[in-house]
Amino acid sequence: GTVVVATKNAGKVREFAHAFGKLGMDVVSMFDYPNLPDVVEDGATFAENSRKKAREVAEALGMPVLADDSGLEVAALGGEPGVYSARYSGEGATDARNNEKLLRELARVTNGGETAAQLADGTKLLSEARFVCALSLYDPASGSFTESEGFVSGSIMDRPRGDGGFGYDPLFWVDSEQKGMAEMTKEEKQAIGHRGRALADLLRKLED
Ligand code: ITT
């Protein structure tokens, strides 16, 4: 079968294609429907934005659609950037600019990381943080949602590590694995990451 994912984020598409590929399913995304209007993400929570994306796209296409709203919550920044993770650096935001902005903001509040824990190579761990992923599947025929959430805890590094993943992965140290998120394979990230955990939970709910 085919799963429609309401995303224009290429990193998310790669991860869903990998996960659903193992189940023998194909993924199509908003790159395959370039004429659909953008969904305005004005919700206060990841779950709200996820529901909004799933429902609007599902109603436009007349078929079930999966949506992912996700982001990074940084303790030393009071939970920012949160639902603003994609637009953290403002107009024309890119992953690179968002990561620069994150280090700039953390430098302001952590005093250069003077008291921060360090990895063996001198990399400083500036703050505790977590990734959040809220998934929603909306079926327009029944008007019903299936929803799940996944989390992974870690720390923000003062310099990037690894070249996998996307978004804030290069600055995210996964405490439980003693590895950077961008140092993991797709398989490893799916096993311990926010998106993989949310997806496993969603699939369990759909089996019931
Ligand atoms: P869609 O709404 O089209 O899906 P988006 O990039 O705007 O794409 P979000 O609003 O959910 O998606 O923003 C999520 C941001 O959080 C994303 O741009 C990344 O910077 C970050 N993010 C989410 N998941 C991540 C992951 O697995 N690794 C690193 N950063 C992630």
Image (cartoon, rainbow, N blue to C red):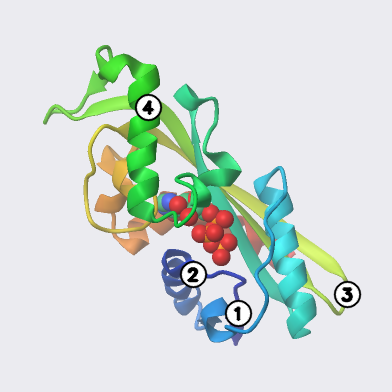
Residue type beneath disc 1: Val
Compute the Cα span from label 2 to label 1: 9 Å
First along the sequence among labels 2 and 3: 2
Q: Which mark is residue 106?
A: 4
Front residue of this view, candidates 128 and 89 = 89
Residue type beneath disc 2: Phe
Using a 10 Å C-alpha cutoff, classify the residue at mark 2 as few (fewer than 14 neighbours), some (14 to 19) or many (20 or more).
Answer: many
Q: Quadrant of the C terminus?
A: bottom right
Q: Which residue is mark 1?
A: 3
Identify the element where label 4 is drawn: helix
First along the sequence among labels 4 and 2: 2
Q: Which mark is residue 142?
A: 3
Compute the Cα span from label 1 to label 3: 17 Å
Compute the Cα span from label 4 to label 2: 31 Å
Using a 10 Å C-alpha cutoff, classify the residue at mark 1 as few (fewer than 14 neighbours), some (14 to 19) or many (20 or more).
Answer: some
Residue type beneath disc 3: Ser
